[in-house]
Image: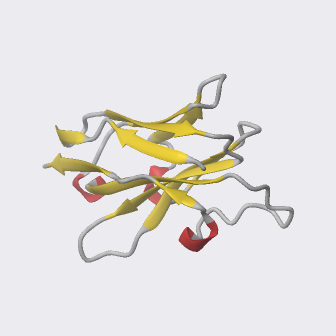
Amino acid sequence: QVHLVESGGGAVQAGGSLRLSCATSGYIYYLAWFRHAPGREREVVAAIGDDGSTNYFGSAKGRFTVSTDSGKNTWLLEMNDLEPEDSGMYYCAARSTRSYRGPRWWLAEWYEYWGQGTQVTVSS
């Protein structure tokens, strides 16, 4: 059984930075960060595989960095130059089974485990 626990959310002003952390138990092949803002659909912002490969989506490109430690127990999302549009609940989502058809990063249903979420609020 895999457990995910996010931390690091908070309130910052536009242009500021936050670091989100997702503590995991069990082996993770794929992990992604999703954002869910009021009135908007849940969307993937960044993803990382166990091989260290990374993917960024939408406005996260160039501003966010996803990484993991050597033990692959802590997964980070560094968010810089934050904008009010970045506000929302951030979730880490993980898959502990390898997908031989390749990762479907954008598909929430593809992930097997979810954390409880951490709130990010960016004020203008």
Q: Position of residue 117 (x, y in %)?
A: 34, 53
In the image, farthest residue toward the top: 70
- Name above or below for residue 9 compared with residue 85: above
At x 86%, y 62%, the residue is 100
In the orientation shown, which residue stands out farthest toward the front?
Answer: 1
Q: Which quadrant of the view contains residue 6?
A: top left
- At 18% across and 39% down in the image, what residue appears? 12
| Location of residue 85 in the rendering, given as x and y in whole percent from the top left corner | 27, 59
Q: Left or right of 57: which side holds 70? A: right
Q: Is residue 27 left or right of residue 122?
A: right
Find the residue positioned furthest to the right. 100
In this figure, what is the number of numbered marks? 0
Task: Identify which residue is drawn at 60% across, 62% down.
Answer: 112
The residue lying at 75 percent from left, 56 percent from top is 97
Give the image location of residue 57, x and y in percent.
Answer: 54, 58
Scheme by which the image is coloured: secondary structure
Vertical arrangement, residue 78 with respect to residue 93, above or below: above
Q: Nearer the viewer, residue 96 or 99?
A: 96
- What percent of the width, then of the height, locates residue 78? 43, 35
